[in-house]
Amino acid sequence: MIKVLIKNGTVVDPSQGIVDKIDLLIEGDRIKRLDYEIFEPEAQVIDASGLIVAPGFVDLHVHFRDPGQTYKEDILSGSKCAVAGGFTTVVAMPNTNPPIDSPHVARYVSAQGKCWGLCDVLPAGTITVGRKGEELSDFYALKEAGCVCFTDDGSPVQRTDIMQKALIFSSELGVPIMNHCEDDLLSQGSVTEGYLSALTGLKSRYPEAEETMIARDCVLAYRTGGHLHVQHLTTGFGVELIRFFKEKGVKVTCEVNPYHLLLDEGTMLSEGPLARVNPPLRKKEDVLALREALREGVIDCVATDHAPHAPYEKGLIDSSLPGMIGLQTALPIMLKLVEEEVISLVRMVDLMSCAPAKIIGLEVGTLKEGSPADVVIFDPKKEWVLNEETNFSKSKNTPLWGKPLKGKVIYTLKGGRIVYKENS
Ligand SMILES: [Zn+2]
């Protein structure tokens, strides 16, 4: 059996409360042992001096555009991007063409992921047929075909009765219902309501579009006992609502996109359409509230919402498609928050690895002996730039393109195999 020995690194594993300079031995596709000074002459040795060794990151929210829009991304380019960012498991959103509303599309997505063998690409099934918000998908068949959650991401579920039924199924199946919370009637525009909309005259996406739907869905989760997962939370009051319902014992979890922790509405003035995302970049006070909630634990995990688009789809703010690529920039953004002492390094690994794995019930997100050997090894100090040479996505729509970043993945291992190695 192939053995890999990771030596001299600092192991950070929140699942076992470990932050220590210890070695890690992998045998086959599993973690064999964690200990001081492991000696194993047959093993391939990775020298991790000065580096952090952590459980591979898990991203609950990516758009790989496959099938249907592979000019933006496909499962191979998306997987390459994922492992270069340290992610060993990703959940692919179902707004593909055709959407993941039937078992054969779900099987196609996971089979493609397995075929390239870089990271697990787990399909999210749609809540409704065709993501039209009218008729529930066959959750049983989709779960059987490998779907780990259900969402109509990008098309929030507007009908309360549909969301209620979805959450009832969630409690029966033990699978989370994820919602992109924005009321369509209050989110017709492209920027948040406030300084920027007043200055530019651009139509708004109101924060209350998001908050009213969070409140509605939390009430439904409270009544049905279903598991609600709020996608890409952006507002300070949204945090308050989630805290309230969590304290009531409601099964609600939520994610935040690294960009919403870093950038505010003002970024649109310098970056234009590249900074357009739904829900939009909000006010400074919202960014601060999200950071506080991250520290406090009201926010459960970080998810990139990696959303590739072609350059011509990002033309003007008002007409551009929303979204940014984010798999390779997540770690540097999160490390910036560690450097600014918003969160600890342990909390960061928890948010990017252990916590998201737990939300969908995976056995990854830990370096416990016997677990899958999904490991990320990164240099928290290494400076680099996302450009034509370093980017693995087919797209380059991010306001961080060409800007200096700090923190770089050096190795990613999936099931004990090296699937990414930085060439330097
Ligand atoms: Zn979304």
Image: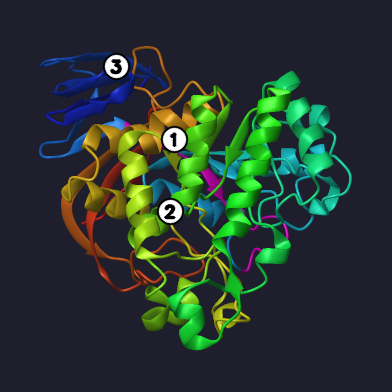
Label 3 element class: helix
Is the shortest distance between ligand 1 and the CB of mark 2 under 8 Å?
A: no
Image height of 331 relative to 104, above or below: below
Quick one: 93 or 30, which is closer to the camera?
93
The reply to whether discs 3 and 1 touch (Cβ–Cβ < 8 Å) is no
- Which residue is tagged 1? 300
Label 1 element class: loop
The reply to whether discs 2 and 1 touch (Cβ–Cβ < 8 Å) is no
Marks 3 and 2 sit apart, C-alpha to C-alpha, by: 26 Å
Q: Position of residue 133 (x, y in %)?
A: 82, 50
**Looking at the picture, which amino acid does disc 1 mark?**
Asp
Q: Position of residue 270 (x, y in %)?
A: 36, 82
- Which residue is tagged 3? 16
Disc nearer the start of the sequence (2/1): 1
What are the residue bounds of the magenta stretch? Answer: 55-71
Q: Which callout, 2 or 1, points to the residue nearer the camera?
A: 1
Q: Position of residue 310 (x, y in %)?
A: 57, 74
Q: Is residue 21 visible?
A: yes
Quick one: 291 or 52, which is closer to the camera?
291
Q: Residue at x 11, y 36 (%)?
A: 49
